[in-house]
Amino acid sequence: MRLNSLPCPVPAEALLPSTLTRAGIQPTAPVGVFDSGIGGLSVLKALHAELPLEHFVYLDDSGFAPYGERGDAYVTERSRVVTQHLRRHHGIKALVIACNTATMAAVAQLRTEHPDLPIIGVEPGLKPAAAASHTKRVGVIGTRGTVTSAKFHALRRSLQDQAEYVVQPCDGLADAIHRSVASADLSNAIALCQKYISTMGRFGAQAGEIDTLVLGCTHYVFVQDQLAALVGPQVQIVSTGEPVARHTRRLLEAAQTLASAGPGRVQLTTTGDPALLQAAARCWLGFATEPAFEVRPEQALPLGL
Ligand code: DGL
């Protein structure tokens, strides 16, 4: 499967010119969205569908990715650097952490450091999956950082009477998906999906089989069709973009900072390769963005400042 065989609904000439961002928290300020790479585009797509009047600024931290196998201290520090950058340079009015790994490692720290900023995290949809499952056997795939985190264990424990969870860390899968954009070839990512899915036991609608699969990493949405083909048509796939977008709307409403006039602009920034982010966005978002550009966030201020 070649990536460039996917439909690319946004022609390059439809891209909007760059404009300056505003400073200060006001309804017209942007919502910041970040991920270790392109995975968070799946969340950005749902956010834009739910909140078409909002201006979004997306930060792809692929210059420092992957997060998933790096450990909490590293991921927390990157999350702090990126959040401070989005506040200082874009005056964001809310932050969506479009990354399960960063949410698990850093959401508590970020909320402590930015008590005035609404912060929305993403976490694997164990609860909706348990509700949707008939066999009460739910598969969960995610990065090692996510599925070994204390926050994930607490979530799993709190739902242990609702379903049995078969959890599989997928080392290297997010990175393979990211690289597939550069190489325009998904075959490595598909091979990893096959390897990990085959270790999880039987999928299907019969008692004892896994009938629901949770995508616990935002990158995995981009191989959702390939995963669906591997697990079969009787297995439902649960991802979290839409509930996160609805939650973001509720928080903006509560803070009375919902944008009331559009259209919203979408700005793409990256610590990695802007051409790669632009290519992924053009193929997968389905709406026009401003041209992606590179950013170099400064070191984060020390804790407590
Ligand atoms: N997209 C990120 C997540 O949802 C992780 C990707 C990575 O390993 O960097 O967990």
Image (spheres, helix red, strand yellow):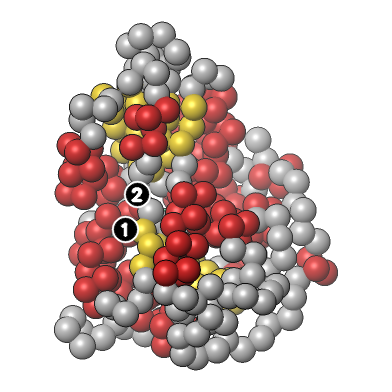
Q: Nearer the viewer, residue 180 or 223?
A: 223
Q: Nearer the viewer, residue 257 or 65?
A: 257
Mark yes or no: residue 137 visible.
yes
Residue 174 on image: x %, y %: 44, 48
Q: Is residue 300 above or below residue 210?
A: below
CA gap, disc 2 to disc 1? 7 Å
Q: Is residue 269 above or below residue 156?
A: below
Q: Nearer the viewer, residue 120 or 36?
A: 120
Q: Secondary structure at mark 2?
A: loop
Horizontal relation, residue 5 to residue 211: left or right: right
Residue 120 on image: x %, y %: 38, 62
Mark yes or no: residue 81 visible.
no
Disc 2 Cβ-to-ligand 1 distance below 8 Å: no
Question: Which image quadrant: the C terminus?
Answer: bottom left
Q: Amino acid at mark 2?
A: Glu
Residue positioned 25% across, 59% down in the render: 105
Q: Residues within 10 Å of mark 2 (few under 14, many from 20)?
A: many
Residue 20 on image: x %, y %: 61, 89
Residue 191 on image: x %, y %: 49, 31
Disc 1 Cβ-to-ligand 1 distance below 8 Å: yes
Q: Amino acid at mark 1?
A: Thr
Q: Is residue 3 above or below residue 64?
A: above
Which mark, by number, is residue 13?
A: none
Which mark, by number, is residue 103?
A: 1
Q: Is residue 61 above or below residue 219?
A: below
Which mark, by number, is residue 123?
A: 2
Q: Secondary structure at mark 1?
A: helix
Q: How many numbered marks appear?
A: 2
Residue positioned 46% across, 90% down in the render: 24
Residue positioned 46% across, 79% down in the render: 92
Furthest residue to the top?
206
